[in-house]
Image (cartoon, grey):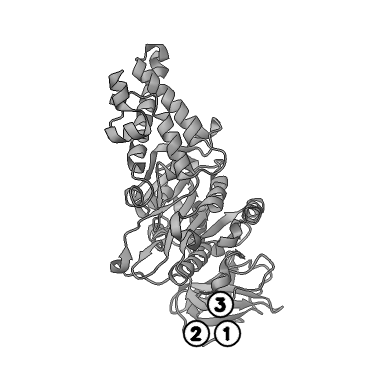
Amino acid sequence: MQVDVRTHGTATRIEGPLLFLRRTVNVGLNDAVEIIDAGGRTRLGRIATLDEDSMIIEVLESTSGLSLATTTVRFMGESLHFNVGPDLLGRILDGVGRPLDGGPPVSATRRLRIDGLAINPAAREYPRDFIETGISSIDLMNSLVRGQKLPIFSGSGLPHDRIATEIARHAKLRGEEAGSFAVVFVAIGVSYDIAEHFRRAMENSGALEHTVLFLNLASDSSTQRLLTPRYALTAAEYLAYTEGRHVLVIMTDMTNYCEALREVSASHGEVPSRKGYPGYMYSDLATIFERAGCIMGKAGTLTQLPILTIPSDDITHPIPDLTGYITEGQIVLDRELDRRDIYPPIRVLPSLSRLMKDGTGKGFTHEDHPSLANQLYAAYARSMHVRVLASIMGSEGLSGVDQLFLEFGNRFEQELLHQEGARSLEQSMEIGWRLLQPIPVLELTRLSDEQIRRNIRNLDAEHAG
């Protein structure tokens, strides 16, 4: 039941996106409100803090023009909800689900809470199967599995926005379920130019047909930024668990989300923790990341690919540190590779997909895929060791085998890591087998004789020679 309350005599102050009131009605924490100014304009908000005598309302838009004496607050008596329906795909929405594409509001068949419903852990199924992103260093070396949450750790100035766009345009399922794939692309706190780049890239490539685009601009309020991933994940949960689609949620940039969390926490007067971030940031991030997964009895799945820029390239910073505890691995971008014009500049050795073994191999991708990935990883790790030796003693002092591995490392970066346009998994594997051709058989310890005979060289002919 809605209740209208005039703030005349009850409002104490407006501070940034926060409206402070004396409590005169019985309301609940996180209840939705509408703030109506003297001109009749309505702004959305929610109750962020309350006690017996006062409450704080987070206004999800600019508070410019609000007057304490003439503002009306309408209490909705429920938490924030999002109207979702089958025509979500192809839409461009703002951070709280309102149309930005000039179209009508989303036709609603369901009305869902944006904070989601708790999932019984016993109802979760283990993530399995493979999502092809079109990027060799992910698909071949650190595969993304349906239901997984796999973050990309980037840095300021690195091409994570380009990578996010490429994955959104080219990601797909393999086999019969390819048509049931959908993407929810979430831009959090980005500039207008970047938002327009995302919009044009989706529209011009045709990927918008199976994509929902949420755009939260840097000029939007920090309180709205905290809700953008929750609105987007509500849309994703509807597509996955009601419509039975396999949904990939790409969120960039989660660092902007955490900065907004710190800003709003400071506005509330909360005691800060590490580097000024609130002590509950871990549990707050978990409420977002743990919405990924597979649920028994549901045909669809929800996979997350959050992107975050590491402040000062410090991987021990609270944002990547806490994210790593919640998610199942990480993809790490490298500034040195970027300086050498290798795109995408993904550092293979510190990158990891903990669920790769459950979504690759026979019945999922290719029976030789895991072994090939392991062998490439081992060979590249050795090439990095040899590269250090060569920098100290010169390449002339290396053995013949070490020189082969040094050459392998250079070719691995130039031919496999670096790519122009999307590649299929088969194309990536073909490059991987070709790179291993010069390596002596005795050094290919991660491959079976049959795999070497079938994919690299004929062992019988070699021994006979």
Q: Are marks 3 and 1 in contact (CB under 8 Å)?
A: no
Return the mark for residue 108.
3
Q: Give SS at disc 3.
A: loop
- Marks 3 and 2, Cα distance to the nearest angstrom? 31 Å
Provide residue 458's location: percent of width, then percent of height.
33, 28
Provide residue 264's location: percent of width, then percent of height.
51, 61
Task: Tell me the residue at 63%/58% (across/down).
Answer: 219
Q: Earlier in the sequence, mark 3 or mark 2?
A: 2
Give the amino acid at mark 1.
Answer: Val
Mark nearer the viewer, 3 or 2:
3
Q: Residues within 10 Å of mark 1 (few under 14, many from 20)?
A: some
The answer to which of 66 and 309 lies nearer the viewer is 309
The answer to which of 262 and 108 lies nearer the viewer is 108
Q: Give SS at disc 1.
A: strand
Give the labeled residue for mark 2: 25
Give the amino acid at mark 2.
Answer: Val
The answer to which of 72 and 99 lies nearer the viewer is 99
Q: Residues within 10 Å of mark 2 (few under 14, many from 20)?
A: few
Return the mark for residue 5.
1
Give the amino acid at mark 3.
Answer: Ala
Quarter of the image containing the C terminus? top left
Task: Tell me the residue at 40%/67% (across/down).
Answer: 299
Provide residue 102's location: percent of width, then percent of height.
69, 68
Q: Are marks 3 and 2 in contact (CB under 8 Å)?
A: no
Q: Residues within 10 Å of mark 3 (few under 14, many from 20)?
A: few
- Marks 3 and 1, Cα distance to the nearest angstrom? 29 Å
Q: Are marks 1 and 2 in contact (CB under 8 Å)?
A: yes
Task: Tell me the residue at 28%/21% (across/down).
Answer: 463
